[in-house]
Image (cartoon, grey):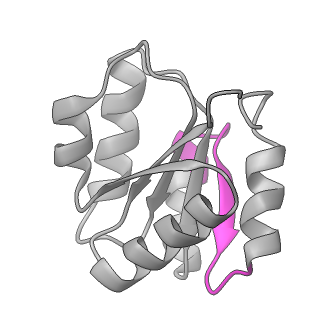
Amino acid sequence: MAPRTAVYVIDDDDAIRDAVCTLLEVCGFAALAYATGAEFLRDASPAWAGYLLTDADMTGRACLELLNQVKARGIAMPVIVMFSDLRKRVAVARRHPDAMFLDKPFTAEDLLACLGAGNGAGK
C-alpha cells in the first residue's frame, strides 16, 4: 500500500479546520491539523513532503508571515491558500506567486483539483 500524501491544514477556525481534515481523510490523504502558523512552524521540517493548505483570513498578517517563514526555512511544498477576502488573496499572490488559491466556500472537487495541480506532490 502506497503512503498517503500529507496535507498540513492551518486554519484558526476549528469547524472549518475539522471539516477540511475530515474531507481530506475520506479522500485518502493524511490530514495534519494546526490552529496557527506558529504551531505548524514548531513542527515543520524541510524534509516534509505533501501540501500546505492555509487560510488567508487568519488574524492580522498571519498567512503572509507563515508563508514568509516557510520559504525562509526551506520548506518546499506546494501551497494552497483558502480565502474569502480578495484583498488578502492579492496581497498573498504578490509576495508568493507560486501559491494556488481556493475561494471559500469551495467544494470537495475544487479542493481535489488544487491538490492534483500541486507540482507533482499529490497522489
Foreground of the two, 81 or 3:
3
Of the 4 image quadrants, the one containing the C terminus is top right
Image location of residue 56, percent across then percent down: 44, 65
Quarter that holds the N terminus:
top right
- Residue at 43 percent across and 21 percent down: it is 75
The residue closer to the viewer here, 101 or 49, is 49
Query: x%, y% of residue 65?
Result: 29, 45
Q: On the image, which quarter does residue 67 sit in?
A: top left
Q: Is residue 16 left or right of residue 50?
A: left
- Total labels drawn: 0
Is 23 colored magenta in this rendering? no
Stretch of the chain drawn in magenta: 93-107
Q: Position of residue 27 (x, y in %)?
A: 70, 60
Residue 90 visible in this rendered orientation of the protein: no
Task: Please tell me whether residue 91 is drawn above or below residue 1 in the rendered image.
Answer: below
| Along the viewing direction, whichever of 120 and 89 lies nearer the viewer | 120
Q: Residue, x 82% and y 71% (percent of image)?
A: 109
